[in-house]
Amino acid sequence: MISHIKGILEEKFANSVIVDVSGVGYEITVPSLDFESVNLGDEVKFYTFHKVSETDEALFGFLSLAAKKLFELLISVNGVGPKAAVSILSLASPEEVRNAIANADSVFVSKAPGVGKKSAERIIVDLRDKVGIPSRYGATVINTPGKPNETDEALDALIALGFPLKEATAALENVDPTLPVDERIRLALKK
């Protein structure tokens, strides 16, 4: 299993990137917000999911560990493949997608290309209890390309420490998001 790839971004095309790691180029399919966030020549690190089937191998990459974990939850739903999961994660930041699922916003989820109303409802039913409580209530707004992809470094750190997404989200629930990352982590670990 390839858990992450770190190297120089060499090529960008159609929501895929090629990252050069010591002379070897890895093609990685990424959500559109991550695609828009990186530039040619940048040193990048993508958390990856390596999909292997009888006829195909593919790498799916994410700039945050939280996005990768949400991707893994999405593909655990019956009928949701990696391409549909990337499509859903291309709608908004990982936190906004997680929040939409927690709010049972199937209209938002169904706006992803290749995801119909029934698939969106199945995702909500299967994942609502696994993604944690909503951080905000109401309809989720779809991001537009070029809008910065906001990642929660404290959430990523807790997931890296072994917390499941739901527990990491719950631990950060009442912690002031304006505090420095290390302080937010410290306060979340006290809970």
Image (spheres, rainbow, N blue to C red):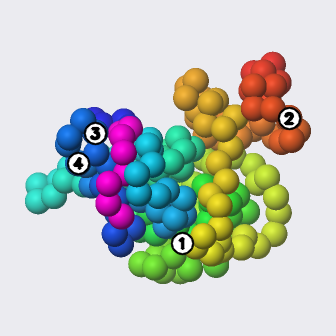
Crowding around mark 4 (Cα neighbors within 10 Å: few <14, some 14 to 19, many 20+) is some
- Could you say which quadrant of the image residue 171 lies in? top right
Highlighted magenta segment, given as a residue range: 5-12
Query: Helix or strand or loop: what does disc 1 sit on?
Result: helix
Residue matched to label 4: 25
Compute the Cα span from label 1 to label 2. Answer: 35 Å
Considering every residue shown, the one lying at the far left of the view is 55
Q: Which circle, 1 or 2, is nearer the viewer?
A: 2
Q: Mark 4 near mark 1, Cβ–Cβ under 8 Å?
A: no
Compute the Cα span from label 2 to label 3. Answer: 35 Å
Earlier sequence position, callout 1 versus callout 3: 3
Q: Amino acid at mark 4?
A: Gly
Q: Which circle, 2 or 3, is nearer the viewer?
A: 3
Query: Helix or strand or loop: what does disc 2 sit on?
Result: loop
Above or below, comparing residue 84 to residue 150 in the picture: below
Q: Position of residue 169 (x, y in %)?
A: 71, 40
Q: Amino acid at mark 3?
A: Val
Residue matched to label 1: 120
Q: Residue 179: give its label.
A: 2
Query: Helix or strand or loop: what does disc 3 sit on?
Result: strand
Residue matched to label 3: 21
- Could you say which quadrant of the image residue 92 lies in? bottom right
Q: Amino acid at mark 1?
A: Ala
